[in-house]
Image (cartoon, grey):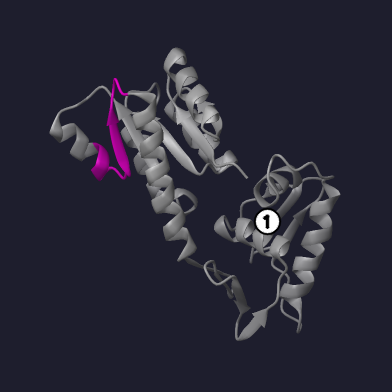
């Protein structure tokens, strides 16, 4: 699946230019025109990277960056900050707020794309070494091993991807369409009931031996990983 970049820019010509160059380079994009919309889309779309303008309506880019870093679901989200501010103190402030990189306007599209690819490479390398834990389930991303308590869980590749999506945002309810996008990719066209089949297989693997079911079904919508199903 192509990585999704959230572009947070209130100047439409600049936003469209970023969108055009990123999509031409193989990324998917989502656009936000102010700080509050940026936080909403970061929660709903779970982007792989954010390009964040400093000067925004409603909430500044600095405040958006700080809030994203305070949330568990976006604490490690790669962020590149864009600004017309070029003085050293402003660059330090932007990086101290949690940005991974900082680009001063005007910049060339090629430089931006090079920065995006570099930040993405660092992020992917870090994630592949990551271990995720929730509700007694431990997932080792690099070795593709899953355990629940002391018991090893055997999962097929699709069930592993589904579990990873759910574990990266525990408690968040994903629609079937969102799970298809994240576990199979947007270029794969499958019926949404395919998700139900693989969720059933995932449940069977996780619950073997009488372990409690922590996959919550939201009727008519989708699924969440949740230890507090009530």
Q: Quadrant of the N terminus?
A: top right
Is residue 230 visible in this depiction of the protein? no
Per the image, the residue denoted by label 1 is 224
Residue at the image point whose x is 39% and y is 41% from the top: 79
Q: Residue 213: x, y in percent?
A: 73, 70
Residue sitting at 61 percent across and 60 percent down? Answer: 164
Indicate whether residue 46 is drawn in magenta: no
Q: What residue sits 48% from the left and 36% below the top?
A: 39
Q: Position of residue 220 (x, y in %)?
A: 82, 46
Indicate whether 29 appears above or below 145. Answer: above
Residue at (82, 46) in percent of width and height: 192
- Whether residue 101 appears in magenta in the rendering, the answer is yes
Towards the viewer: 54 or 28 = 28
- Give the magenta range: 94-107
| Residue that extends furthest to the left in the rendered view of this protein | 88
The C terminus sits in image quarter: bottom right
- Residue furthest top as drawn: 13
Q: Quadrant of residue 104?
A: top left
x and y percent of residue 161 in the render?
Answer: 65, 59
Above or below residue 219? Residue 92 is above
Residue 89 vs residue 17: left or right?
Answer: left
Q: Position of residue 48 (x, y in %)?
A: 50, 44
Location of residue 34 by image quarter: top left
Residue 4 visible in this rendered orientation of the protein: yes
Q: Is residue 200 left or right of residue 22?
A: right
In front: 166, or 190? 190
């Amino acid at each position: 699946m192509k990585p999704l970049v959230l572009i947070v820019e209130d100047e439409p010509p600049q936003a469209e230019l970023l969108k055009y160059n990123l999509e031409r380079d193989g990324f998917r994009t989502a656009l936000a025109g102010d700080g509050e919309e940026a936080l909403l889309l970061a929660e709903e779309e779970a982007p792989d990277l954010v390009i964040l303008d400093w000067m925004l309506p409603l909430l500044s880019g600095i405040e958006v960056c700080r809030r994203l870093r305070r949330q568990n679901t976006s604490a490690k989200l790669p962020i590149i900050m864009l600004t017309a501010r070029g003085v050293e103190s402003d660059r330090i402030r932007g990086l101290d707020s949690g940005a991974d990189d900082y680009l001063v306007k005007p910049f060339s599209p090629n430089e931006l794309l090079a920065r995006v690819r570099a930040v993405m490479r660092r992020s992917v390398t870090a994630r592949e070494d990551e271990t995720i834990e929730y509700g007694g389930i431990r997932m080792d991303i690099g070795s593709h091993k899953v355990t629940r308590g002391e018991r090893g869980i055997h999962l097929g590749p699709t069930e592993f991807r589904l579990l990873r999506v759910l574990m990266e945002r525990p408690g968040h309810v994903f629609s079937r369409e969102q799970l298809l996008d994240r576990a199979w990719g947007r270029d794969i066209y499958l019926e949404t009931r395919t998700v139900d089949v693989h969720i059933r297989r995932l449940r069977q693997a996780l619950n073997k031996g009488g372990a409690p079911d922590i996959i919550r079904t939201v009727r008519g919508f989708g699924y969440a990983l949740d230890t507090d199903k009530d």
